[in-house]
Image (cartoon, rainbow, N blue to C red):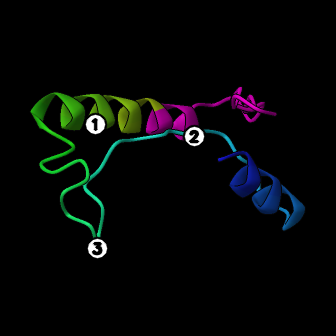
């Protein structure tokens, strides 16, 4: 995720959120089968709502997320 953040910023994007989510592998389906589950989906929906709130806020002073490894 750190590398993706760095690439995005170098390309002129402003990273305002980041998430590491467990999901079933697209080719090797035995890895994380059934993920995200209902709990995971609920957490992702909550996180998405927080991102939307941040985008729609009157404040343009978006904070940069603290990504482990940066």
As measured in the structure, the alpha-carbon distance from the residue carrying label 3 to the one carrying label 1 is 25 Å
Compare marks 3 and 2 and give the one earlier in the sequence: 2
Residue behind mark 1 = 45
Q: Residue at x 31, y 29 (%)?
A: 46
Looking at the rendered image, the disc whose residue lies closer to the viewer, 3 or 2, is 3
For residue 10, side relative to residue 13 (left or right): right
Q: Is residue 14 above or below residue 39?
A: below
As measured in the structure, the alpha-carbon distance from the residue carrying label 3 to the one carrying label 2 is 24 Å
- The secondary structure type at the circle numbered 1 is helix
Give the x, y percent position of residue 12.
85, 63
> Is 51 or 60 nearer to us in this picture?
51
As measured in the structure, the alpha-carbon distance from the residue carrying label 2 to the one carrying label 1 is 14 Å
Compare marks 3 and 1 and give the one earlier in the sequence: 3
Residue 58 magenta: yes
For residue 37, side relative to residue 48 (left or right): left
**Magenta highlight range:** 51-70
Residue behind mark 2 = 18
> Is 18 or 31 nearer to us in this picture?
31
Q: Residues within 10 Å of mark 2 (few under 14, many from 20)?
A: some
Residue behind mark 3 = 27
- The secondary structure type at the circle numbered 2 is loop
Q: Residue at x 69, y 32 (%)?
A: 67
Give the x, y percent position of residue 48.
39, 39
């Amino acid at each position: 995720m750190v590398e993706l953040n760095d690439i995005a910023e170098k390309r002129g994007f402003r990273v305002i959120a980041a998430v590491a989510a467990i999901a079933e592998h697209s080719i090797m389906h035995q890895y994380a089968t059934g993920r995200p589950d209902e709990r995971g989906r609920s957490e992702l929906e909550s996180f998405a709502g927080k991102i939307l709130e941040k985008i729609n806020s009157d404040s343009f002073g978006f904070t940069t997320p603290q990504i482990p490894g940066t």
